[in-house]
Image (cartoon, grey):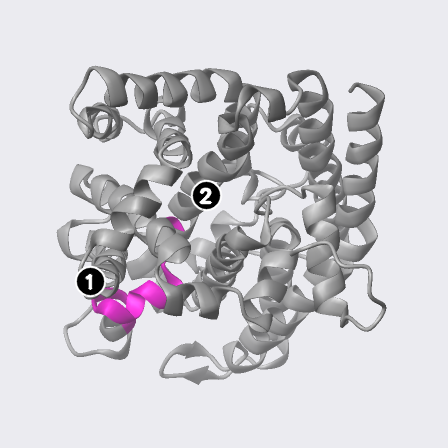
Amino acid sequence: MQMVTTTSRGPQEREQSLRAREGTPGAPPSSRLASLDGLRGVASLVVLVCHTLLTVPRLAETGFQFGSATPGSWEWWLVATPLHVLWEGTGAVYLFFVLSGFVLTLPFTKPADRLPSWRSYYPKRLARLYLPVWAAVAFAAALWAVVPRPKTGSGWIDAMGAGVTPERILGDATLLFTDGLVVPPLWSLRWEMWFSLLLPAYVLVAVALHRAARVHWMPWAQWAAAAALIGVGTTTVNGFVRDLPLFLLGALLAAHREELAATVTRLPSWTMPALAALGVVGLWLPWVVGSGSPAAHISLSAAAVALVVVALHWRPAVRALSGRAAAWLGTVSFSLYLTHEPIVVAAYHLIGPLLPARTPIGPAALWVSMPVGLVLSLAVAAAFHWMVERPSHRVAQWLGRRFA
């Protein structure tokens, strides 16, 4: 994502350059970190695949409602084996949290003479989050106004069928206290916003712990403290206790980026692929130990940290995640996350009545509605990025200059 002025660059390269200039939400600050953008893009695709597969009633029973599947059945293979990593939506959200902790903290770990201004940070950050969120809420409300959502008997589909009311629209638009009623993925953006508001505290803690570790403490004492916070989060479903500490893991990675890079160069060549394998296993393990268990929370947290380190420092992963496909997904990842769920559910409701026959996986309509939902979600995400997200970046940049 280096800034280059030549006119011979392709649209993907120009887009990456613009993201580097504008500092888009979730975008890495330099080309050296482009692989993190690709990792975020892959995670957003995993969420899309997850929600698409959850329109299958038997997968919703096991993957959403934590039911049991008959060993050897097709749903058992998708839910209870490592294949589940390909649609592990919850693990993808953990990745989002750790990535955001890293990317937002990183600029504030620079030398004092190059630190960004907190005065400009807040208006820029609020614009970058709120403007796309408001547009996504309006899009979802409009889509639900024209697509009826009768009860289907499928647990996940019906859970996404909450009525759109002015109160729910307002709740989602304020973001800080929503559970995602009109735009369900906003439940996680709620914690993203809280972290964004509390970023100075995260930076203070991460930098202070980093300095203390170098001068007074054992180097990994702070990671033990972070692990203890994650452990406390296993005792509750309160997001302030359970989810916000995940951002600290990314903040600590940012504060230790130089030491981490130096350590990686001294490790045996097999270490990074082994860490990647452990990250993948960590995403799958919750379906062995129980998805809602304390061990699942710890496993997903550790997996997110491992995969971020791999994306930063393992060359094969860096190359793959910096490639065109992953880079494009990274470009539209925020828009895809905001807009895909109403599209996937609407496709199910629109096509289902047209093909009422049954198949071994459920309604025959799923063979049509799932690929339609996938393709439309990607197309709408690309359009939403150009029509909403990019203009919001420009507004954010103007606000940053205004309050510099």
Amino acid type of disc 2? Leu
Q: Is residue 268 left or right of residue 359?
A: left
Looking at marks 2 and 1 on the same chain, the residue that comes earlier in the sequence is marked by 2
- Asked if residue 85 is among those painted magenta in the image, a careful observer would answer yes
Task: Read off the residue under disc 2.
Answer: 99
Please give the name of the residue rendered at 25% of the width and 65% of the height, measured from the top-left corner: 273
Task: Read off the residue under disc 1.
Answer: 274
CA distance separating discs 2 and 1:
21 Å
Quarter of the rendering occupied by the C terminus: top right
Q: Quadrant of residue 82?
A: bottom left
Query: Foreground residue, 93 or 393?
Result: 393
Quarter of the rendering occupied by the N terminus: bottom right
Residue 353 appears anywhere in the view: yes
The picture places residue 210, in percent across and down from the top left corner, at 32, 23
- Asked if residue 48 is among those painted magenta in the image, a careful observer would answer no
Q: Which residues are magenta?
A: 78-90
Q: Is residue 231 left or right of residue 324?
A: left
Residue 380 appears anywhere in the view: no
Q: Is residue 95 left or right of residue 191?
A: left
Q: Secondary structure at mark 2?
A: helix
Amino acid type of disc 1? Ala
Please give the name of the residue rendered at 18% of the width and 37% of the height, measured from the top-left corner: 294
The picture places residue 127, in percent across and down from the top left corner, at 74, 31
In this rendering, the count of numbered labels is 2
